[in-house]
Amino acid sequence: MILITGADGFIGSHLAETLVKQGRKVKAFVYYNSFNSWGWLDHSPYAKDMEIFSGDIRDPYAVKEAIKGCSHVLNLAALIGIPYSYYSPNSYIDTNIKGVLNLLNAARDQGVEKFVHTSTSEVYGTANYVPIDEKHPLKAQSPYAASKIGADQLALSFFQSFNMPISIIRPFNTYGPRQSARAVLPTVISQILQDKKKVKLGKISPTRDFNYIEDTISGFISAQNAQNDYGEVINIGSNFEISIEDSVNIIANILNKEISIDTDENRIRPDKSEVERLWCDNSKAEELYGWKPKFAGIEGFTKGLTSTIDWFSNKDNLLKYKADIYNI
């Protein structure tokens, strides 16, 4: 049995579905709420084949119960919004650090065969050199990034101290169907599809390494199956760098729309907090896993964006997004 935390979210729901399709037994840990919502799994045709566990990783008792009977843990549960971390940093410590500690303790007690922890490229901060490999210094330019650095170090400490079979997957900017409107690409797509002629954005000069959801999922599954990566951090990214501005132009071209960009001061990070450049060196993933992105380069990025736009173009999907509201 594979426990996936954050299974109700963007990446977690895709991962849970993919593993079920591969015939694996999945326990989907979703965030307990009074609406009994399972997030993106609410309408998943594969949810019936999962064991759904509603809880909160901040509660050690819930975590201990969830891990019972599981041989593998894939931890994707986290608070992810960078702007929100400016206002509620304590929440990020509680979830992203204390929650991970609860999972590590329970997994150690359970004696799991493999624990895969999710990091983020945000822990690197603005690149000192490119492409960024796993030896690049860590730099917390937001409370969110600081909480993820802390969680990563906790996970590595359990490998060093207790010889737990742990690896850390560090995805660069994953995109695709179901991605949160907090992220830049869904923000752009949803505004254009709702006939906005002026797209509201923050700073458009930073560059990112966008990785399509299918490639990120294959990276997680490679880590879950591997036994040669204990105590290692592995970047998962496309090894292709593009600016926010150029990404917007590609989206507009795919949709055959003429738009302009309206700078919204509310969406601009504080100067020292903006990560100006991210570009992934994915050679370690290839070396350890034989992993390569299928959506690489400008052609792969365009293909992934087209698939993402197709999903957003479904009115039922688009209605789930509030294009008129800046969601921190």
Image (cartoon, rainbow, N blue to C red):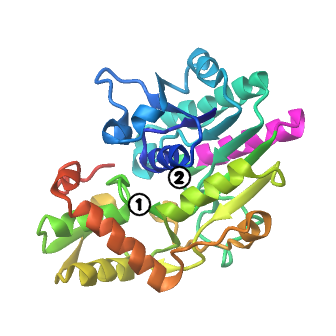
Whichever of callouts 2 and 1 sits on the residue coming sooner in the sequence is 2
Residue 150 lies within the magenta run: yes
Q: Quadrant of the N terminus?
A: top right
Task: Determine the image quadrant of residue 54.
Answer: top left
Residue 154 lies within the magenta run: yes
Asked whether residue 119 appears in the rendered view, the answer is yes
- Magenta: main secondary structure equals helix
Is residue 49 toward the left or the right of residue 140 in the image? left
Cα separation, mark 2 vs mark 1, equals 9 Å
View extreme (front): residue: 23
* Marker disc for residue 142: 2
Q: Is residue 101 above or below residue 208?
A: above
Image location of residue 240, percent across then percent down: 55, 79
**Amino acid at dot 1:** Arg
Asked whether residue 272 appears in the rendered view, the answer is no
In percent of the image, x 87 and y 40: which residue is there?
160
Image location of residue 324, percent across then percent down: 16, 56
* Marker disc for residue 269: 1
In percent of the image, x 55 and y 46: which residue is there?
19
Magenta stretch bounds = 146-164
**Amino acid at dot 2:** Ser
- For the image, the number of numbered tags is 2
* Viewer-nearest residue: 35 or 160: 35
